[in-house]
Structures are given as C-alpha cells and as structure tokens.
Image (spheres, rainbow, N blue to C red):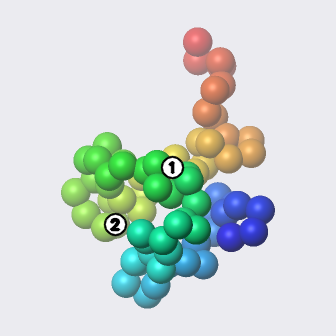
Amino acid sequence: MPGGKPAGVRCVQLTAELRCTLFGLPGRPAVCTSLKPSIGMCGGSAGEAMRILAALEAATGPGGTAGSTEDA
C-alpha cells in the first residue's frame, strides 16, 4: 500500500481467504517478510490472531501505547 498500511485498515493485498497476494515476491514489504508467525502473535485461531494483530496495531499506531512510560 503506498505510504504504508494504516492501523485498522485491511491490507489491499489480502485475498478473501486471508492469503497475501505478494507472498514470496520480491516486492513484498520488508515489514511483512520480517513477521514470523508465533503463538504470541497468531494465537490458537484465526479470530484470536485478528484480535492480537488489532491490539498490536493499536499499540504501535499514532497515539498508541508502544514506548509509553506512563506505567514505568
């Protein structure tokens, strides 16, 4: 997506089956190729994975809590 994918916006490269149309292609964004599936990121189901990813996007987006020192 030109300029990056905003938090909460579905990637335009995802198919209806949640498959990446750029997977394995040289033009796939580095942020995508650097993601490594894990239980902590994917959970135990597709629904849980979507909730975890939504929380990660919210935490790391503008106004998110990533890097916050409020609880430190």
Whole-percent x, y for residue 31 in the image = 55, 52
User: On the rendered structure, is 66 left or right of 16?
Assistant: right
Left or right, residue 72 beside residue 51: right
Q: Position of residue 63 (x, y in %)?
A: 74, 41
In the image, 30 versus 46, the foreground residue is 30
In the rendered structure, which disc, 2 or 1, sits on the residue that comes first in sequence?
2
Q: Is residue 48 above or below residue 65?
A: below
Disc 2 target residue? 47
Decide if residue 61 is on the left or right side of residue 22: right
Q: Residue furthest top?
A: 72
For disc 1, the marked residue is 55
71 w.r.t. 50: above or below = above
* Label 2 SS: helix
Residue at 70 percent across and 61 percent down: it is: 4
Dot 1 falls on a residue whose secondary structure is helix
Q: Which amino acid, mark 2?
A: Gly
Amino acid residing under circle 1: Ala
Specify the quadrant of the image occupied by residue 10: bottom right
Using the rendered view, name the quadrant where residue 17 is placed: bottom left
Q: Quadrant of the N terminus?
A: bottom right
The residue drawn where x is 77% and y is 62% is 3
Give the Cα distance between marks 2 and 1. 13 Å
Quadrant of image for the C terminus: top right
